Amino acid sequence: MTPDELVGRLVGLFPDFADHWEGPDNLSREADGSSTLCGAFAEFSHYFCEHYEELPPERLQALGWVLAECMAEPDTELDEAAATCFLENIAAERFHGDFE
């Protein structure tokens, strides 16, 4: 999965993330629009933390499946990005137990 494909999957689940991703405060997106897998997950983690309580449960479940898919092959760039740039970023958040 490329960074653009990952962002597309995340926007598909959480359409409001598109505005966040395109916003001027996104430090994970380069001037040419490119990013890394880690950058995409890191920026999504900020959006996720800000909006967790308003996200539909069925979309949260679908996100869990996306994460499982991303982590299916251990020690890959995609696996490491999901683990370190998303899951670790939300580990201490107020909702972590719910999302677990």
Image (spheres, helix red, strand yellow):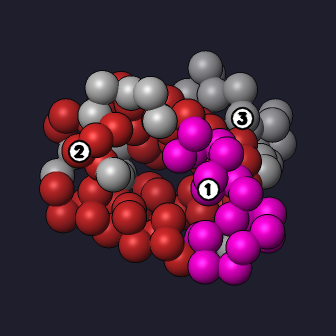
Residue 86 part of the magenta-drawn span? yes
Mark 1 belongs to which amino acid? Answer: Ala
Which of the two labelled residues, at mark 1 and mark 3, occupies the earlier sequence position?
3
The residue identified by callout 2 is 98
> Given contact means CB atoms under 8 Å apart, are the residues at marks 1 and 3 in contact?
no
Residue drawn at (81%, 37%) of the image: 30
Range covered by the magenta-colored residues: 70-88
Left or right: where 58 falls relative to 74:
left
Residue 39: image quadrant is top right
In-front residue for pair 2/32: 2
Mark 3 belongs to which amino acid? Answer: Ser
Which one is closest to the eye, mark 2 or mark 3? 2
The residue identified by callout 3 is 28
Assign the magenta stretch its main secondary structure. Answer: helix
**Label 3's element?**
loop
In-front residue for pair 34/98: 98
Left or right: where 27 falls relative to 22:
right
Which one is closest to the eye, mark 1 or mark 3? 1
Residue drawn at (18%, 37%) of the image: 54
Mark 2 belongs to which amino acid? Answer: Asp
Q: How far apart in space, not on screen, are marks 2 and 1 (Cα)?
A: 18 Å
Q: How far apart in space, not on screen, are marks 2 and 3 (Cα)?
A: 27 Å
Residue drawn at (44%, 27%) of the image: 92
- Disc assigned to residue 17: none
Which of the two labelled residues, at mark 2 and mark 1, occupies the earlier sequence position?
1
Percent position of residue 28, x then y: 72, 35
Q: Badge 3: how crowded within 10 Å, few (<14), some, or many (20+)?
A: some
Percent position of residue 29, x then y: 73, 38
Which of the two labelled residues, at mark 2 and mark 3, occupies the earlier sequence position?
3
Percent position of residue 72, x then y: 61, 79
